[in-house]
Amino acid sequence: DEALGKLALAVLQLERRFVREDDVIQQVQTGLRGLAGSKERLGSSHPDVVAGLGSLYADTVSTLRPRVMVQGNPHYLGQAGVVSEIRALLLAAVRSALLWRQLGGSQWQFLFARRAMVESVARHLG
């Protein structure tokens, strides 16, 4: 899906900005620590935990540019629970991009090795 590639590139660009903003990193760390108790009590997929992660993303990472624009059915994108899930997933995506970079990944590598990555994922899932 072409939109997924664009979304992934936007997240990689956002991660570059995120790592340069020490105050935002600090806010995310503090927010994650604050949610740790709820996660332990309720589980990581509980709606309250997901809403907390979504709110954390909205208050911190989403203030950075470039903004990641998610497209979809307005009916679903208008539902608070769906919006929280998307924001929580975007927070996870930024973390994944950070780990990708820490392991030597680059935006160019992502662009030129996408097919190999898709085939690898398909092998692991199939």
Image (spheres, helix red, strand yellow):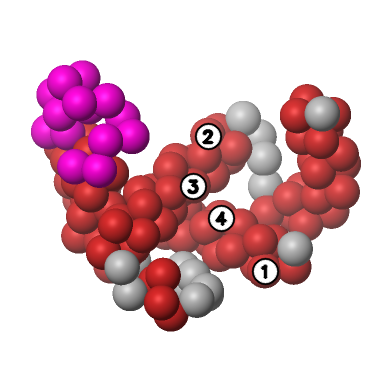
CA separation in Å, label 2 and label 3: 10 Å
Q: Nearer the viewer, residue 7 or 27?
A: 7
Q: Nearer the viewer, residue 102 or 35?
A: 35
Task: Please report the residue visible at 78 percent of the width from the left and 57 percent of the height from the top.
Answer: 111
CA separation in Å, label 3 and label 1: 15 Å
Q: Nearer the viewer, mark 2 or mark 3?
A: 3
Q: Residues within 10 Å of mark 4 (few under 14, many from 20)?
A: many
* Picture coordinates of residue 96, whole percent (x, y): 52, 39
Label number found at residue 35:
none
Query: Which residues fall within the magenta stretch?
Result: 33-48
Query: Dot 3 lies on which element?
Result: helix
Label number found at residue 93:
3
The type of residue carrying mark 3 is Ala
Q: Residues within 10 Å of mark 1 (few under 14, many from 20)?
A: few
The type of residue carrying mark 1 is Ala
CA separation in Å, label 2 and label 1: 22 Å
Label number found at residue 3:
1
* Residue 59 in view (yes/no): yes
Task: Please report the residue visible at 26 percent of the width from the left and 36 percent of the height from the top.
Answer: 46
The type of residue carrying mark 4 is Leu
Q: Nearer the viewer, residue 123 or 81?
A: 81
* Picture coordinates of residue 27, whole percent (x, y): 18, 46
Which residue was labeled with disc 4? 12
Which residue was labeled with disc 2? 99
